[in-house]
Image (cartoon, rainbow, N blue to C red):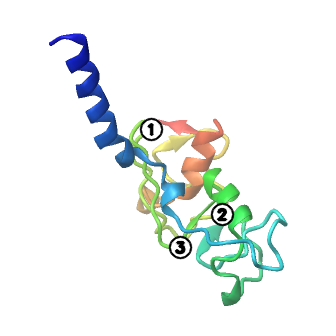
Amino acid sequence: MNFSKKALTLGLALAFFAPLSVAPAFAVDFGNNSSQWAYDGECDDPRFVGAGMDEILLDEDAYADAADCRALYQKGIIQLRGGSTKTVSSGNFGDNASQWSYDGECDDPRFTGPGVDEILLDEDRGHDAADCQALYNNGQIRWK
């Protein structure tokens, strides 16, 4: 194959596969910043859960706190309710079905490090994705 055919093949491959590698944050509709609580550093959108959420959530703030929610989501501090977190390069973090999800500590016994809770239950294996991925991304835990 000559150079032009290789370049064309590479270009076609990138055009086909690039949309498949879009980060999850781009797939989420964060809405706009029309909430009176926009830009306060906390996510007020009740569609999300996690450590960066405001304590009082109102239905009227759904899709209305985009800047805060996007920033916290991209850092792995909050997730969509019932959402799962998965990365190919680091492994499968699982879902957020544990009763201890979104408490800021990793409760998954597959991890070790200062961000892992002292009490680990096998039933939480693969079920604390948001906390574990955020701590993993910050270098506070590692896979065993």
The crowding category of the residue bearing disc 3, from other C-alpha atoms within 10 Å (few below 14, some 14 to 19, many at least 20), is: few
Give the residue pinned by disc 2. 103
- The residue sitting at the top extreme is 2
Name the mark nearer the viewer: 1 or 2: 1
Q: Nearer the viewer, residue 114 or 128?
A: 128
Instruction: Say above or below: 84 vs 132.
Output: below
The type of residue carrying mark 1 is: Ser
Give the residue pinned by disc 1. 90
Q: Quadrant of the N terminus?
A: top left
- The residue sitting at the left extreme is 1
Q: Are marks 1 and 2 in contact (CB under 8 Å)?
A: no
How far apart, in angstroms, are the residues tagged by discs 1 and 3? 22 Å
Under circle 2, the secondary element is: loop
Instruction: Say above or below: 95 vs 36.
Output: above
Q: Is residue 30 left or right of residue 90?
A: right
What residue sits 49% from the left and 65% below the top?
Answer: 96
The type of residue carrying mark 2 is: Asp
